[in-house]
Image (cartoon, rainbow, N blue to C red):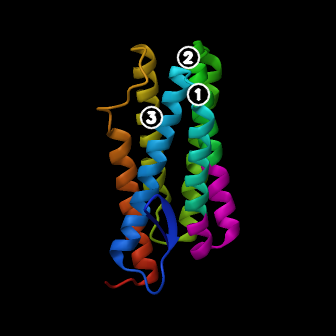
Amino acid sequence: MYLYRGGKSTMTAGPLTQLEVISAFRGYATRHVLWTRAYMAAIISETGNADYTEQRCAENTREFADMIGRYYGYENARAVERFVTEGTAAARSLLRHIKSGNGSSYARIADERKGKAEQMARLYGTMNPNWKTDELRRYMQDQYAEMEWEMRHHLAHHTPDFTGHRAADLTALEMADYMAEGFIKQFGIMY
């Protein structure tokens, strides 16, 4: 399992503890929301940081996919990485369409994001019998809706400041805890 320590991921040695598993899943979820939000802020403010934050989103996605690959196979890891990367691209496209007022494209992109959430939830469900598709779909769709609300709010108020809006953070942590619990059950981690 990769854990995030001192600004970089490190592979743990020996058996995993429940705390390490929970910390790893929560760390990935927290960084995903953080870097996605930073990416949205860079696009809104047009500061020129969008490329860096997009790269950081991709790096976090690769780290998560690598962990998935170690336990669930590299074919699944590539699929997870592809879905998360496509989701980030869809968020960027959605934000740009919201900014431009292009409603017809917005509806198409929003439907595509729902489809990606469905595909990803099904994929996770095939990897771990404790990860239920309906539950994961709900978490992902809730998080998409919360992040979209944040995008709209910040565009309406002409600010890239995302402080004070934490619904997406809480949903991401709930999903991380759910997935960590399923991982602990699947692999029989007792302590």
Magenta span contains residue 75: yes
Residue at the spot 40% in from the left edge and 76% down from the top edge: 184
- Which numbered tag is attached to residue 94? 1
**Is residue 42 depicted above or below 116 in this figure?**
above
| CA separation in Å, label 2 and label 1 | 9 Å
Q: Gap in Å between the C-alphas at discs 2 and 3?
A: 15 Å
Question: Position of 129 compared to 122: left or right?
Answer: left
In percent of width and height, residue 170 lies at 33, 47
Q: Position of residue 96 (x, y in %)?
A: 60, 22
Q: Main secondary structure of the magenta part?
A: helix
Any part of residue 102 in sight: yes
Residue stretch in magenta: 66-84
For residue 147, the mark is 3
Q: Nearer the viewer, residue 116 or 39?
A: 39
Query: Label 2, on which residue?
Result: 99
Residue type, mark 3 in image: Met
